[in-house]
Image (spheres, rainbow, N blue to C red):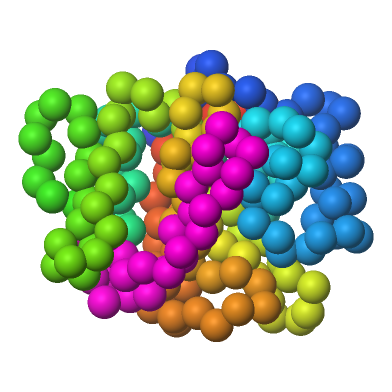
Amino acid sequence: MMAAAQNKPASTAVPCASATHAPMVRDFYENQKPGRPLPVASRHFNVAETVIASALPATQSIGTAGSAQVAQTVWKSIDEWGANTSIKLVLTSGGKHAYSFPSLVPMAKPDTGEGWLDMYADDSKGVHAHINGQYLKAVFATDLPGPKAGERTQAISFYNQDGSLVLGVYARVAGETFDQAAVEGFKKTWAVIESLPRICAAK
């Protein structure tokens, strides 16, 4: 009973996929651009990125409603990937322009009690990131097959209410080198998100 309650769909204000989105998005990833990061499909279809994430099969994408508490819970799991683990960070401007850069895992600072999630990479010498939980409305984990056997694109993505990306933490991108520690960590963070209430209609 408890497990069923935990996985009950959460109420949502973010844009979710409709019945017409799913076949188009799945065809894009199966036959056109397998393994491409979610911002690519978002721009291709000119829809919010949460529409793309929620159109994917449940084996490839799971999401939960965002909040300051959820951000802390999910990022605590990302912290456990390790401070010296290499990842790729992705953010967008208005959902139309994507910025991607390599980084070590940004480690969260203790909760200030103000609803902010503050993270610093490379012992504060690298990326500084600050997420306001008041505006965080969804978190998705996605695991997409790439064009070649064994390739995957695996990401934990944080979203605004309009479904645009706040920050994507990519453990690996199909066709690129990756840190195995990030891949192992991604599996554990997927399990954390899987234990939280689902967002958007069941696929």
Vertical comparison of 66 with 83: above or below: above
| Quadrant into which the N terminus falls | top left
- Depth check: 121 or 52 in front? 121
Residue 73 versus residue 154: which sits nearer the camera?
Answer: 154
Q: Position of residue 2 (x, y in %)?
A: 40, 33
Q: Is residue 6 above or below residue 124?
A: above
Q: Position of residue 144 (x, y in %)?
A: 68, 61
What span is in magenta?
79-107
- Image coordinates of residue 150 in percent, x first then y, are 69, 80
Specify the quadrant that holds the C terminus.
top right
Which of the 4 quarters of the picture holds residue 13? top right
* Quadrant assignment, res 23: top right
x 47%, y 73%: residue: 183
Q: Position of residue 51 (x, y in %)?
A: 68, 33
**Is 170 situated left or right of 107 in this image?**
right
Q: Residue visible at 46% across and 64% down?
A: 101
Can residue 19 be seen in this snapshot?
A: yes
Which quarter of the picture shows residue 163? top right
Residue 90 is a magenta residue: yes
Q: Is residue 140 left or right of residue 53?
A: left
**Residue at coordinates 31% horizontally, 65% vertically from top-left?**
105
> Can residue 65 be seen by looking at this rendering?
no
